[in-house]
Image (cartoon, rainbow, N blue to C red):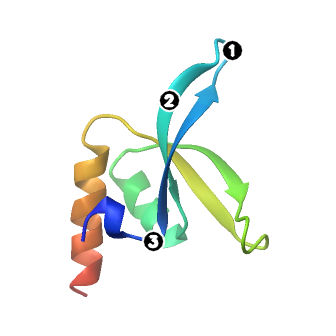
Amino acid sequence: MTVADDANLQINETEVGPMQTNEKTYTIFTKKMAIELRKLGYKIIRTEPNRDKPELDVYVFSVYGNFVQDLNRLLEENKSK
């Protein structure tokens, strides 16, 4: 399974910071995956209410370094469990 195959992920280009620069981000919908990414050193840039389930949060990460490869590896590991 790749990032594009996972329905719980969403890629965005957002305007952030005082200069409003474009930054690629991933929105992670599961707390478990957000925690795993944090353990690898990736930082959550913000949380937002889930549009479909407002009682839940989504976790927005900046895409840099090996983020996509690490995310794909975590998805494969979780799929095999």
Amino acid marked by disc 1: Pro
Alpha carbons under labels 2 and 1: distance apart: 13 Å
Determine which residue is flagged by label 1: 18
Alpha carbons under labels 1 and 3: distance apart: 32 Å
Q: Name the residue: 78% across, 70% down.
A: 54
SS of the residue under disc 3: loop
Q: Name the residue: 39% across, 62% down.
A: 36
Tell whether 43 sits left or right of 76. right
Determine which residue is flagged by label 3: 7
Classify mark 1: residues with Cα within 10 Å, few (<14), some (14-19) or many (20+).
few
Q: Name the residue: 31% across, 45% down.
A: 67
SS of the residue under disc 2: strand
16 to 36, vertically: above or below: above
Of the residues tagged 2 and 1, which is closer to the observer? Answer: 2
Tell whether 6 sits left or right of 21. left
Determine which residue is flagged by label 2: 23
28 to 62, vertically: above or below: below
Which mark sits nearer the N-terminus, 2 or 3? 3
Outermost residue, top direction?
A: 19
13 to 67, vertically: above or below: above
Tell whether 32 sits left or right of 37. right
Q: Name the residue: 62% across, 61% down.
A: 58
